Amino acid sequence: MLLYAQTPARRNRQILADLIALLLIAAAVRFALAVHDAIMMLAEPGRKVENSGDSLAAALDDAGETASRVPLVGDLLKTPFRSAADAGSGLADAGQSLQDIVGQVAFLAALGLIVVPVAVVLLIWLPLRLRWIRRSATLLRLRDAPGGADLLALRALTGPPGELAGVPAPPGGLADAWRRGDQQVISTLSEIALRRAGLRP
């Protein structure tokens, strides 16, 4: 199984197409990661809110513990500090929730920006490459099979006529010579069919 053509011009075009496809995929991934990082910057306020809420809750907890040591009224003083510390914890939770939402949005945006362009590139490029690989394998099997040259010659006759213009036509034309089994014409036509696909005769 050949991955690339045997003729230099066709092989160079295939390599160029492969490189372009890989560059487009790499550019899509790089752009998606840049968008992900830009969206994640929106999570910074959430981190600040979370840190502030945690710090406030810790400070109020400490103040409540200190107030609880006051004789007679310590437990009464501790209750409002405990309530305020819970509010600080709620603030920290809100900051964490904001970070989670921003992270999910960043992930989905990056995923979409990778999947869509990569799918488009693969849908355009991959079928063409696979079709050439299958066709070249078929032509190589024909080339090596008994009677395969006749089929290759027929393929050249039914293909674009431009490449046949340079072939010297015997009396009655190329098609008639092929039907008569003219080995020189069959050999020339089979070479044209192989070269057309980027394969060496």
Image (cartoon, rainbow, N blue to C red):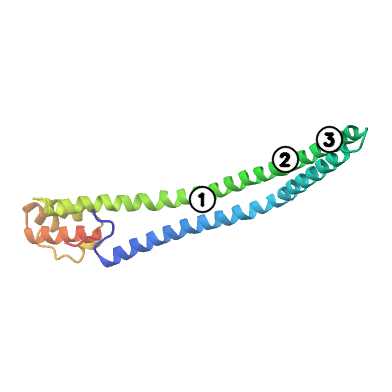
Residue at 14% x, 62% y is 188
Q: Which mark is residue 93?
A: 2
Q: Is 162 on the left-hand or right-hand side of 20?
A: left
Earlier-in-chain disc, 3 versus 2: 3
Q: Secondary structure at mark 1?
A: helix
In the rendered image, residue 108, in percent from the top left (x then y), is placed at 58, 45
- Residue 174, quarter of picture: bottom left
Q: Is 184 on the left-hand or right-hand side of 28?
A: left
Between the residue at mark 2 and the residue at mark 1, the CA separation in whole angstroms equals 31 Å
Proximity of marks 2 and 1: CB atoms separated by less than 8 Å: no
The answer to whether residue 118 is above or below residue 196 is above
Say if residue 28 shows up in the picture: yes
Q: Which mark is residue 132?
A: none
Q: Which residue is mark 1?
A: 114
Residue at 81% x, 39% y is 85
Type of amino acid at the residue the image marks with label 1: Ile
Say if residue 154 shows up in the picture: no
Q: Nearer the viewer, mark 2 or mark 1?
A: 2
Type of amino acid at the residue the image marks with label 3: Ser
